[in-house]
Image (tube, coloured by chain):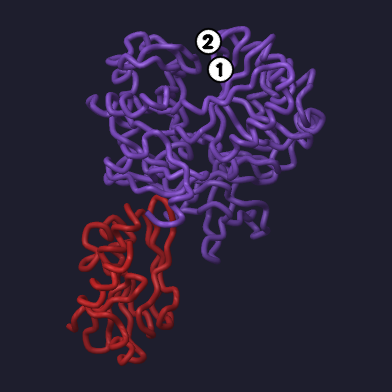
Chain colours: A red, B purple
Amino acid sequence: MSEMRFTKDHEWIRVDGSVGTVGISDYAQHALGDVVFVDLPEAGRVVAKGGEAAVVESVKAASEVYSPVSGTIVEGNAALVEHPALVNESPEDGAWFFKLTLSDPAEVETLMDRGAYDAYLQTLD
Amino acid sequence: MTASETSLLTTPLDSLHRALGGKMVPFAGYAMPVQYPAGILTEHLHTRKDAGLFDVSHMGQVTLEGDDPAAALEELVPGDIAGLGEGRTRYTVFTNEAGGILDDLMVSKLSPTKLFLVVNAACKDADFAHLAARLGGRLAVTPLLDRALLALQGPGAAAAMAKLAPSAAGQTFMTIRAMDVAGIPCLATRSGYTGEDGYEISVPADRAEELARALLALPGVAPIGLGARDSLRLEAGLCLYGSDIDTATTPVEGNLSWILGKRRREQGGFPGAAVVQRQLAEGPARLRVGIQPLDRAPARAHTVITDSAGQPVGEITSGGFGPSVNGPVAMGYVPAALAAIGTDLKLMVRGKPLPAKVAALPFVPHRYFKG
């Protein structure tokens, strides 16, 4: 499995062959606060790079989760529907949001690696 | 500090909020803590289980003093203020000529010649001007700009308060007393906006932090931000001015007819009385109701409500996740014909019609101390 890549909207993606696994970063879950609901895409849905793919809701507000790359949804993480707080507990591991088959694997190269993302976070706040 | 923060007003507890790790956000022109490190969910549940301390110093405090201020105030509000006993507190609203609501407020009778009002932060300048313009010729209208306001709420509030003000224990819901709290001269009402027992404590601004620190030092008392204040009042079915009620809604439409005393319903004499009396007689066209989404998805403010056939009939005015309910809760306006408890509705959330029902308010039972 490849290293994790990040977007400026705080999604991450890990690619294994032609399938990417997407979630939100630890920074994102901390900024959201307690997650109480997730709305996940259905299998077969086609998503564009930067397009709306899922929704994550805290007590306070709803936020969009954008797909880091283009592709077709394989599955959403059913565990999150049952246990949304998992997003706060293990955002960059067990609490992945969805998997998708990449339509253009080269898009991954346009995303930030961990070092670049950490540097980007330093420019926020 | 960013440029946008420099223009914000601060409360006397500003440095305490920051020391406690409060996440400060702009609210009604003030920098206010939306949450502390514990987070909204934990703060909400803590308040229902123990006791929460809220800074509500951004709200407006004003006294009306003179000859029969109750009779004068009745020209601006539909509540029975003349019938309010000394030392008692009542919830009411300012209405406009169309019967719309300019603000909601608490009125306490300190003496036959002096009333104490607490109004919303976002409306206070307009309220003060309204009071001065309409009553200033007869009464001394005095905004209390040098006072802070703290709310102590929750089932543990009474025991905590009793440690610092023994006389507070016997005080009942919706009464006001002048008392020393931790040796500081305060004005305390047994009231609040969470549905729980508790107090709202008016304190001199220069001693507010001392009082807050004394309360926070007591076992079970934790600081609570505006985020949990909003989810607590929503579960309690209480209106947020500007969302659930405003100048376009009357007290009758807002399901606040209970604030109209029998005498005021009959005699009128407040702005918009004819509109309100007609709605009382004929029934309003629409009504604020509790709405229970049947799925897990929260329906936020401005979500379109449809009838079971999919016709748009109204809008959610407050909605979100209720931590004590452990699910979504909402309020909104529906036509009177669809206002009965149990009526099937649909909520258009991200383009999808989600099932919901009209629900009884409050979502969480009130636990006031009535003696």
User: Which numbered dot is residue B87?
Assistant: 2
Label 1's element? strand
Say which of B369 and B175 sits in front. B175
> At 64% across and 22% down in the image, what residue appears?
B141
> At 31% across and 65% down in the image, what residue appears?
A78
Percent across and percent down for residue A39 are 40, 64
Quarter placement of the N terminus of chain B: bottom left
> At 63% across and 55% down in the image, what residue appears?
B306
Q: Using the image, determine if residue B30 lies above or below residue B308.
A: above
Query: Residue under mark 1: which chain is it in?
Result: B
Is the residue marked by circle 1 packed among few (<14), some (14-19), or many (20+) residues within 10 Å? many
Quarter placement of the C terminus of chain B: top left
Say which of B357 and A6 sits in front. A6
Is the residue marked by circle 2 packed among few (<14), some (14-19), or many (20+) residues within 10 Å? some
Q: Which residue is mark 1?
A: B108
Q: Are marks 1 and 2 in contact (CB under 8 Å)?
A: yes
Q: Based on the displayed image, in which of its 4 quarters is residue B110 positioned? A: top right
Percent across and percent down for residue B329 are 47, 45
State the CA–CA distance, disc 1 to disc 2.
7 Å
Q: Is residue B112 left or right of residue B326?
A: right
Q: Using the image, determine if residue B165 lies above or below residue B326.
A: above
> At 30% across and 60% down in the image, what residue appears?
A29
Query: Residue under mark 2: which chain is it in?
Result: B
Whether residue B154 can be seen here: yes
Q: Using the image, determine if residue B174 lies above or below residue B10.
A: above
Percent across and percent down for residue A106 are 31, 92
Q: Is residue B267 left or right of residue B89?
A: right
How many numbered callouts? 2
